[in-house]
Image (cartoon, rainbow, N blue to C red):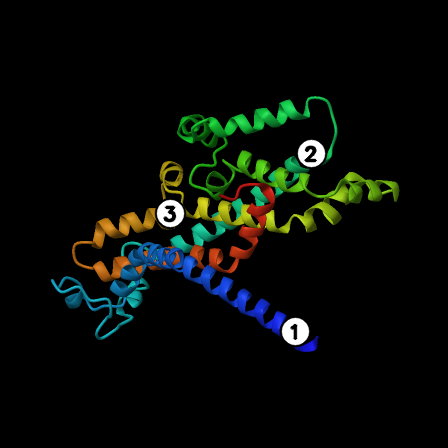
């Protein structure tokens, strides 16, 4: 009997190994396709990095080279040259302050609104939520003139207020957080109410800690949106001190592109690297947040 059992287990393990091998063979073309798409997506970024590490006389040669020979950091040193007309690092500071402030305000306003729509019962709640969602359909370009007039009346042009405050009422953020908060069991809220907790305590101590994946997802989207914003800062900013990084890159490229491709590529790498690192380290939160809010593919 023991011999038969061992034979049976051996057959089962052999069948399992074969099924795994077959699955691996079937998945191989899909895996190869994903690798090729990843290389295709990353090729422009890699070319930009390689170009930023090349000497000027090796950039415009007919022969395409993916390895800088010899590599140099001279293009990055050129960025901090005080003789340059555009101060990239001052623009980097302005963009960083504006993007972080905007992200924090979006998280605050969206989380409060999402909590109201997800956890409180009142008449007209669904209608109001529909009104908020319908604001997503309004093109942002149509709001620029009234927003500009508002900033002008408030004397906020060419300040951080103009870069940060418009857009903090984020309907997408409310929708994202509301979908996540709805999935949190109501028993937790009911138990807290029985124990005498108020809604503000429930919001801060129960709902917010459990909503970290959705909050992280919204934070990354908000940060990247404000970081890459170009048209609105171009309208409301007039001084060099308040110039954001996308504006500085355009001015930098138009001023030096004819003779310093390596320096231009180095400046673009500085602009791209920071949001890329943020996205890389927070990708687990993005996947968790999207999988629990129904936004996954």
CA–CA distance in space, label 2 to label 3: 37 Å
Q: Which residue: 39% across, 53% down?
A: 91
| Few, some or many residues within 10 Å of mark 2 (<14, 14–19, 20+) | some
| Few, some or many residues within 10 Å of mark 1 (<14, 14–19, 20+) | few
Tag 3 residue: 243
Estimate the x, y position of residue 108 in percent, counting from the top left.
62, 43
| Quarter location, residue 106 | top right
Q: Which residue: 35% across, 55% down?
A: 33
The residue tagged with tag 1: helix, strand or loop?
A: helix
Tag 2 residue: 116
The residue tagged with tag 2: helix, strand or loop?
A: helix
Question: Which comes before the other along the chain, label 1 or label 2?
Answer: 1
Question: Which comes before the other along the chain, label 2 or label 3?
Answer: 2
Estimate the x, y position of residue 17 in percent, counting from the top left.
52, 67
Residue depth check, mark 1 versus mark 2: number of the one nearer the observer: 1
Q: Which residue: 27% across, 64% down?
A: 52
| Few, some or many residues within 10 Å of mark 3 (<14, 14–19, 20+) | many
């Amino acid at each position: 009997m023991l011999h038969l059992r061992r034979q049976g287990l051996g057959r089962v393990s052999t069948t399992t190994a074969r099924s795994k091998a077959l699955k691996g063979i079937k998945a191989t073309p899909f895996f190869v396709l994903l690798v090729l798409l990843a290389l295709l997506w990353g090729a422009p970024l890699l070319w930009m990095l390689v170009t930023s590490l090349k000497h000027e006389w090796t950039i415009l040669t007919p022969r395409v080279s993916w390895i800088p020979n010899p590599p140099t950091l001279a293009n990055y040193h050129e960025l901090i040259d005080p003789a340059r007309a555009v101060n990239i690092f001052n623009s980097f500071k302005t963009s960083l302050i504006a993007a972080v402030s905007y992200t924090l305000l979006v998280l605050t306003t969206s989380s409060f609104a999402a909590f109201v729509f997800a956890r409180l019962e009142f008449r007209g709640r669904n209608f109001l939520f529909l009104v908020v969602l319908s604001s997503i359909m309004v093109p942002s370009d149509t709001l620029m003139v009234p927003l500009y007039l508002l900033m002008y009346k408030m004397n906020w042009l060419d300040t951080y207020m103009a870069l940060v405050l418009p857009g903090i009422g984020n309907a997408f953020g409310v929708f994202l957080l509301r979908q996540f908060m709805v999935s949190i069991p109501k028993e937790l809220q009911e138990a807290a109410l029985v124990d005498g907790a108020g809604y503000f305590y429930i919001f801060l101590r129960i709902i917010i800690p459990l909503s970290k994946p959705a909050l992280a997802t919204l934070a990354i989207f908000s940060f990247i949106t404000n970081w890459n914003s170009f048209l609105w800062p171009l309208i409301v900013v007039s001084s060099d001190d308040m110039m954001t990084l996308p504006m500085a890159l355009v001015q930098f490229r138009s001023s030096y592109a004819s003779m310093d491709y390596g320096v231009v590529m180095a400046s673009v790498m500085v602009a791209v690297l920071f949001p890329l690192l943020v996205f890389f380290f927070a990708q687990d939160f993005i996947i968790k947040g999207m999988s629990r809010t129904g936004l996954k593919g």
